[in-house]
Image (tube, rainbow, N blue to C red):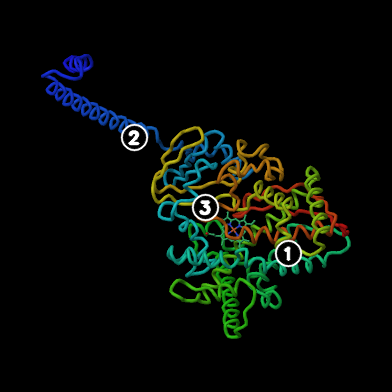
Amino acid sequence: MHDQSIILISLHRPACFNQGLVAMDLTLTISSVAAACLSIAVLFVTSKMIQRRRRLSKEEASVLPPVVSLVSLTAYLPTLIAKGLPAVIHDLHARLGSVFTVSLLGLKKVTLLVGPEVTAHFFQASESEIRQSNIYKITVPVFGRGVLYDVDLATRSRQISFCTDSIKPINLRGHVDSMVQEVEDYFAEWGQHGVVDIKYEMGKLILLIANRCLLGKQFRESMLEQVSTLVHELFDNGFHLISLFLPYLPTPQHRRRDKARAMLGEMIHEAVRSRRNSGVAEDDVLQKFLDSKYINGRCMTENEIAGLLICMMFAAQHTSSSTSTWTGACLLSHGHRSYLEAAIEEQKRIIQQHGERINWGILLEMTTLTHCIKEALRLHPPANLLIRHASKKFSVQTRQGHRYEIPKGHTLATCTTVSNRLPYIYKDPDVFDPSRFAPGREEDKVGGKFSYTPFSAGRHVCLGEDFAYTQIKVIWSHLLRNFDLELISPFPEEEWEKFIPGPKGKVMVRYKRRRLL
Ligand code: HEM
């Protein structure tokens, strides 16, 4: 009231004279300042209260994910047996949403994260928040002591960067000729026509390419049979369920694994010594490792080189042969003739332009074939369950806006098979449709950063993606150019029981030699 009268007086009085003018103006100024201060104080307190309330309601809103007990999981046993783990995860995702925890009698809690909205932290967080190493301890007896998951984080990061550098595009370009040579020689052994198990053929051919590009000419020419046998012994016996919990239990499989690892290791050590002594540089990954140095200038030991080479052989072998086989099965099955025809047309166009030769640049022009491989991988990712450990708690927000807190100590998993078939990202997600990646659609890009994850993503993304595409394109461009092909066995099922699943059983293909142009 008092303030109002002062304002009124000051508004209605003449401006030039009046004794009380100065005093009145002073009163007016003091009162205004007091009012302003009060308003600021009220505003400050109110905003603090709103902030606190917001914080509290956020905390209240973030809850633990829904839990599936072991007992309720038994209802999914028939699905597990008939269709495998991804089918169970698919059903649980449909029922519970994109974040849920499977409690194994309260002893172990596995939180599943499905889809790009909730997997950013899983893929990107630092090792101190989301740990990968303890899950991968299973690889130590296979890759060997002193490498990767057996060493501290700094050493491991450096070793991973040696692997990345060894097959980065500038080095990979040089491998294309060797790949083409291997592929031409391999298929030259086929007759004019016949029937083959394409899965077996791909396994053999990918191993030949790995021998040549990773281990080198010497291995490829004089130790191929021995290396192939040892690699199979090592990988087939190194990854049983028991190895996950008791990797050093002296089971017959573990003994065979250890024997194969020792023999393969010794062969690589010998190759390292003779290469170092000869002073002759070759064009293979072994050579890149010989030339690699740690930050302090130290070269890798024989043991470290052997460990990294075995790791790369392992990471490359089954994933690539499985993808190569799925690509064939998808292209050659009767429902997909239009994509087969499009891939053949692309080869014709490229031959008309460049002739028969293939090099790095020409492979990059094969976009239709690339999309076919990419789509086969989306539907049939060989690494279908990616696993981590939560070293710190974190929270995620689902597409529907539910916020969940994932406690420290949970095992984390994401299933690429389910995540890469989400219907709000991929139209008709179960259909083989390579054109979904073509300009104008690019569903994987529209879906956001973590929508396409057969090669994982973020911190531990596969470093062999380019290598894999290069070798699979070299193989399939040769087949499309030189053979009429037909899938004569039923479209394969998935081998869900395997650690790295592939197509189940034989994948029989009839071939007939022909020239494309
Ligand atoms: C189609 C073929 C391939 C697929 C689908 C594939 C898939 C993957 C996936 C999903 C991961 C990450 C695993 C995780 O996040 O836990 C990975 C990692 C890795 N891949 Fe591949 N891979 C393929 C081919 C290759 C090839 C050809 C090489 C090497 C020549 C290779 C070398 C590696 C290595 C060394 C890692 C470990 C990277 C790290 O831990 O930082 N991969 N791969």
User: 426 above or below 472?
Assistant: above
SS type, badge 1: loop
The location of residue 124, given as percent across then percent down, is: 48, 51
| Contact check, label 3 and label 2, Cβ < 8 Å | no
Compared with 236, 271 (above or below) is below
Structural crowding at the residue carrying mark 2, measured as other residues with C-alpha within 10 Å and reported as few (<14), some (14–19) or many (≥20):
few
N-terminal of the pair, mark 1 or mark 2, is 2
C-alpha span from label 1 to label 2: 58 Å
Residue type at mark 1? Asn
- Residue 40, given in percent of the width and then of the height, sits at 25, 29
Q: Is residue 32 above or below residue 172?
A: above
Q: Which residue is mark 1?
A: 359
Label 3 belongs to which residue? Answer: 458
Q: Which is closer to the viewer, label 1 or label 2?
A: 1
**Label 3, label 1: how many angstroms apart (C-alpha)?**
29 Å
Q: Quadrant of the C terminus?
A: bottom right
Whichever of labels 3 and 2 marks the residue nearer the N terminus, that label is: 2
Q: Nearer the viewer, mark 3 or mark 1?
A: 1
Q: Secondary structure at mark 2?
A: helix
Specify the quadrant of the image occupied by residue 467: bottom right
In three-dimensional space, the C-alpha distance between marks 3 and 2, rounded to whole angstroms, equals 30 Å
Q: Earlier in the sequence, mark 3 or mark 1?
A: 1
Give me the residue at 46% from left, 42% from top. Answer: 103
Q: Quadrant of residue 233?
A: bottom right
Q: Is mark 2 within 8 Å of ligand 1?
A: no
Q: Is residue 488 left or right of residue 419?
A: right
**Residue, x 58% and y 44% (percent of image)?**
451
Q: Amino acid at mark 2?
A: Arg
Report the disc number at residue 55.
2
For the point 73% across and 48% down, the residue is 492
